[in-house]
Image: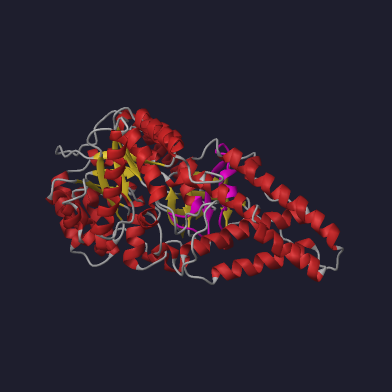
Amino acid sequence: MLKGIAASQGIAVAKVYKLQQPVLNIVKRESVPEEELKKLDAAFAKTVADIEKIKEHAAKTLAEEELAIFDAHLMMANDPDLRSQIEDMINNEKVNAEYAADQVADSTIKMFESLEDAYMKERAADVRDVTFRLKCNLMGAEIPNLSTLDEPVIIVAKDLTPSDTASLNKKYSKGFATEMGGRTSHSAIMARSLEIPAVVGCPEILEKAKAGDMMILDAIAGEIILNPKDEEIKEYTAKGEAYLKEKEALKALLNEPSISLDGHKVDIVGNIGSPKDIEGVLANGGEGVGLFRTEFLYMNSETDFPDEETQFEAYKAVLEGMKGRKVVIRTLDIGGDKKLKYYQFDEEMNPFLGVRAIRFCLLHPDIFRVQLRALLRASAFGQLAIMFPMIATLDEFRKGKAILEEEKAKLISEGIAVGKDVEVGIMIEIPAAAVLADKFAKEADFFSIGTNDLIQYSMAADRMSQNVSYLYQPLNPSILRLIKSAIDGAHKYGRWCGMCGEMAGDEIAAPVLLGLGLDEFSMSATSILRARKMIRNLNYEDMKKMADQALDCCTIDEVTELVKKNIGK
């Protein structure tokens, strides 16, 4: 049995399909530059066309958030700097195009990989993906197309690129197992969106699995069984069928409240990246939207920041679509790993700790004011809550709220309707804000805890780095104490506290969060009903006692064992 990380739940039993990328034998040759440049033009054009086709295929099944990955790839394939470096090498050294592309790609990848921050590492992976496609097109090599699979298989690979994952046909791609990756990697997020079982971060999988072997993929426990016995195949086939039946049975909870056995009510809501994502939230019984990531409006714009009218229509569509349910909309959160095609960020040693989110908005109030006007206008069409991301100090919150109030006064003076009782809150993702939560709660209407960054900043560990992935510990007692500080700070002044990070939908974390007093659990739409079932089978008072014990633990393993013991896992 091999162990990995359960990245997308489900159970699959099928033959192994090993994803083998073409091996490119690139050698240096003297050439005629004019001929090589023509070849390069054709290869770049095909690369762009390939990515556009993949994006078009992916748009049928993926949300805007995931599709933004392909926009980044298109931006790179159209990058004049990348092309000019290859052209210069062809002209100056009179070498063949594939050799020049390989040299430029290799040096660019190594340069980014030598840097420490997560954005640069992601950029290196994008360079590798796009330039590999370019080199294949230069050499006439065919990249495997997973959409053409014609029998049920479990895909085994070192890693899956966004292009690979987007090409999966659910009829035949029963699951995948990769050597690399974590729960927050691109492939994992997309697998959850597609509802395909996935186990990632399994170091031995490529060595041990052979093409055509039978495999059991238990993406609930994060376990893989190779060449299983007949009785194991029967056992796990039955488990898989039971899982699907349970999933179907969960639909009975669509219109039921999220309430514990002893009557404690919480809200279970959805995270979205675009107006069309509300369909999934409503179809899964979501009680509202806990996070609308507005940056995708900006990242999908081709030439400039989206104007007020464009934003207003998007926000209005979500508020009207949710039919009176609360919608928490996060203001612009760019910087770090979120770049724009039409805006050049200043170079920073560590962009994740630099000018991003509310810091960017306060430095560029003209951009911020456009969004706030659009939000306030849309507030007349539903129950809106506005959330400022990456708040570290009370001064930042006060400045952001002051600009909001100014724009509200302007709209009212213009005779434009603004909704009543618009809540204004903050995202708790910086430890300083969690520690000072009781002071923030005097002035903010609510908190929403962003655990992905809170964990990253608390543990001083890049969550995209494989070498320190062991430090991504949502249930580490230190993280739980920060969460408790935020919840208690909110409740001290009668405010509500939610969570919109990955942790909110985790079946081991949820009982602890319930016990800590979390009011709102926001997650991907497909996790809502399972979370509701769990809450309805827990006793709040018992979970409070367990949470107190968890805060007194020393390690994540101790907390995990405590939870499993208390919920019968």
> Percent position (x, y) of residue 346?
49, 63
Does 184 lie within the magenta span? yes
Q: How many marks?
A: 0
Q: Check the image and name the residue furthest to the front.
A: 413
Query: In the image, residue 99 lies at what x, y percent?
Result: 76, 65
Q: Nearer the viewer, residue 195 or 42?
A: 42
**Relative depth, front residue between 134 and 407:** 407
Task: Specify the quadrant of the image occupied by residue 489.
Answer: bottom left
Residue 469 visible in the picture:
yes
Using the image, determine if residue 253 lies above or below residue 64.
Answer: above
Q: Is residue 460 above or below residue 62?
A: below
Quarter of the view holding residue 59: top right
Q: Is residue 287 visible?
A: no
In this image, 461 relative to 380: left or right? Answer: right
* Residue 52 in picture, x, y percent from top left: 63, 43
Residue positioned 39% across, 43% down in the render: 371
Q: What is the x, y in percent for residue 365?
A: 38, 51
Q: Which residues are magenta?
A: 158-187
